[in-house]
Amino acid sequence: MTTTPLEPAIAASGLRKSYGDHVVLDGIDLSVAEGTIFSLLGPNGAGKTTTVQILSTLITADGGTARIAGHDLSTDPDGVRAAIGVTGQFSAVDGLLTGRENLLLMADLHHLARREGGRRASELLERFDLVDAARKPASTYSGGMRRRLDLAMTLVGSPRIIFLDEPTAGLDPRSRRAMWQVIRELVAGGVTIFLTTQYLEEADELADRIALLDHGRLVAEGTAAELKKLVPGGHIRLRFAHATALEAAAGAIGEVVRDDDALTLQVPSDGGVRSLRALLDRLDAASVEVDELSVHTPDLDDVFLALTGRTDPSADPSADTGTDTGTDPGTDAAAGTASDPAKESVR
């Protein structure tokens, strides 16, 4: 008996978007499996926010096709909106309302009955550790609390797919890690997360798959481990108890970088299990004992630099704005604001 493969939660082909002569997206293809975290990584101006806005129906693409939760983006945008939630770069929290009032407002927008809306608000306040602050104006909340409330508002409608556009920009390390835990819990419950970020550590920590976007094109895609293998520089470091073992190992292995003072050898390697096993077999055949072994692989910083020619985007002083440069100021810059009716419609 054969089974039909599950349709991806998000499937896009040949997405294009330009503003005048400026090409923002140049025919990108995406496939995101259900119940996973997919991270779109890239420098400022790469097209990350534009991608989210297209897939969440906030703006239209100039070309290409996409299906979100089984709904065609161009012919059934209402079906897409019913299945998704969006937490944008800029908080949509109303600072004049309390945390509970913000959630009740979202419940009204989702046409929940009053009792159901109240129950849902209480549940989310508890889940996001906001019970003590529930009756305080949101303007008094810390940055981390406002982002948790913002995400809680997105969850009022129980979306199957959530777009998180720079969700931890500007947060302190503790608040960022708290948000990471919330994201993991959502995925454990079956939600699909489409995450854009400029924090390489965040993508490495959370994502099942990562796509690197640069100048509107996807330049690489894979797991964090797969992407790291694209960059040279991985090696295995061996340390020995005495010079005799070091000498014997160097003779058995061949191509190494040796440090006689530290009694270490550095062996080029992709860090994979197969290459590690082959190295240990050669040492065993030469009857050489290793005192200490460590595997060093390039990190996502190395990948980012090698594939885009730029440094870590989170080091850019303008990185926390999250705005894709060169896009229409009437769409990209405004789409995340609380006053944007289009954003509210997809929550």
Image (cartoon, rainbow, N blue to C red):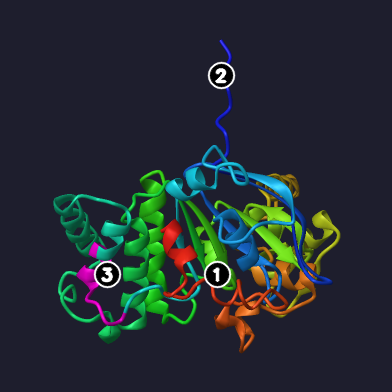
Identify which residue is drawn at 75% across, 48% down: 282
For the question of whether residue 273 can be seen, the reply is yes
Q: Mark 3 points at which residue?
A: 102
Identify which residue is drawn at 53% across, 61% down: 195
Q: Which of 177 and 236 is in front in this view?
A: 177
Q: What residue type is labelled 3?
A: Asn
In the rendered image, residue 101 lying in the magenta stretch gets the answer yes
Taking 11 as reference, is 156 above or below it? below
Q: Is residue 188 left or right of residue 237?
A: left
Q: Mark 2 points at which residue?
A: 3
Q: Which residue lies furthest to the top in this view?
A: 1
Distance from Cα at disc 3 to Cα at disc 2:
44 Å
Q: Tell me where residue 24 appears, x and y as whole percent.
A: 75, 67
Taking 328 as reference, is 196 above or below it? above
Please identify the quadrant where the N terminus is shown.
top right
Q: Which amino acid does label 1 sit on?
A: Glu
N-term mark: 1 or 2: 2
Distance from Cα at disc 1 to Cα at disc 3:
31 Å
Taking 94 as reference, is 232 above or below it? above
Considering the whole magenta stretch, tell me its main secondary structure.
Answer: helix
Q: In the rendering, which numbered label is found on residue 201?
A: 1
Residues at badges 1 and 2 in contact (C-beta under 8 Å)? no
Q: Nearer the viewer, residue 61 or 35?
A: 61
Q: Tell me where residue 243 appears, x and y as whole percent.
A: 72, 70
Q: Is residue 235 left or right of residue 337?
A: right
